[in-house]
Image (tube, grey):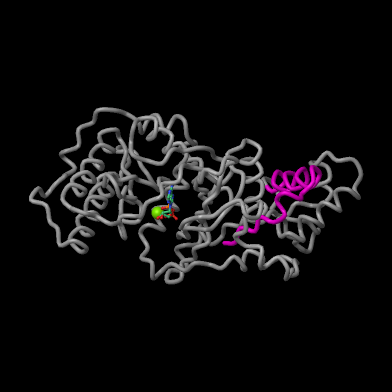
Amino acid sequence: MKLNTHALRYLTHDDWRVLAAVEQGSKNHEVVPTPLIIQISGLRGASGVNRAISTLAKNDLIAKVKNAKYDGYRLTYGGLDYLALHAFIKRKSAYSVGNQIGIGKESDIFVIADDSGTQRVLKIHRLGRISFRAVKNQRDYLRKRNSASWMYMSRLAAEREYSFMKILYDNDFPVPRPIDQARHCIVMEMIDEFPLRTADVTDPAPLYKKLMDLILKFASQGLIHGDFNEFNILVRKETQEPVVIDFPQMISINHPNAKDQFERDVECIKTFFHKKYRYTADDEGPFWEDVERVGTLDALAEASGISKKQAKELEKYLAEVAAKGEEELELEGSDDEEEDSEEEDDEEEEDGQDKPVHEGDEKSSR
Ligand code: ADP
Ligand code: MG
């Protein structure tokens, strides 16, 4: 999805208040009635609020929804992105936004910079943009969700990923340094290296061993990555050290699927090394029985993270997506987000994509 940052610096204090009011109203209302927006914003005078509403709608940060009962607005993903970026900018976690470097099934990845020009990575979680083409009826619980509940799930994914990253980083696992989290977004250290899939691997044997040891090290701390593959492992060119990313689906070793996911992680690496390097290790392991529990980082994650019920809901969704082959999944364009809105297209908005918040601030090398 696009991240058009051009209005970010020009919104007024009132605009932000009104945007935050629409977000807050969305918790209880699919469509937030205008009088409620006025009330939550706490601004004096409806005319100021109406002006803000019109600015926000013009920039696709909120969208007008007409239904039989009343008119109102809902927050768009663009609006949620702005709220998160605004928080990052205020906390000095971000200063400018550069190029998009990744688009996953469930996220958009951008290079950003802090105010000293140091590059960082912004991961925006976007759950729910996948539709399940092949299977219709069984997926009702996913299809029935509205955009507000997808935003909520995306926020859960970001919170969960951030708390795992912090715990892993603090315990010397090779993961990017987590810097900040707001709403459905994470800011983290940028690892300027290629993923294993395309990395320049000088000798597969030692890297293979490091990766298998790492799976065991995760498990010994009670954690199963669950998506340990050539896309989620970056390889440092100089040292051939792996750096692991992508954690929302991580589970505790006590989870009913832990053994399956552990074995799948091992299998993924085996298959990749065999396919790409024709490399097969003499040691057939590691096996589930090899796991020696030495710590309880899973319990720590549980305690610091989101509630059990929320984690379950998120897990159910992530497992559903992971179980589907790519061919059954369809990326939905950002357009359909507006399907029930009245927002007319504003053509000059189209080309603002990928521009730094301040032009010339940022040159990404990738
Ligand atoms: P998804 O959940 O969509 O798979 P990932 O966290 O795996 O998202 O990120 C997608 C891609 O973005 C990665 O394969 C990698 O190329 C790039 N990426 C993500 N995080 C970083 C980072 N911290 N440093 C450098 N590249 C990153
Ligand atoms: Mg990934």
Say which of 279 and 24 sits in front.
Answer: 279
Residue 206 image point, x, y percent: 17, 47
User: What is the number of callouts on the image?
Assistant: 0
**In this rendering, is residue 245 above or below 126?**
above
70 sits to left or right of 288: right
Residue 351 image point, x, y percent: 66, 67
Residue 39 image point, x, y percent: 83, 42
**In this rendering, is residue 19 above or below 271?**
above
362 sits to left or right of 222: right
**In this rendering, is residue 127 above or below 214?**
below
Say which of 11 and 38 sits in front.
Answer: 11
- Give the residue displayed 78% in from the left and 56% down from the top: 72
191 sits to left or right of 154: left
Stretch of the chain drawn in magenta: 1-26
Residue 141 image point, x, y percent: 51, 57
The quadrant where residue 57 appears: bottom right
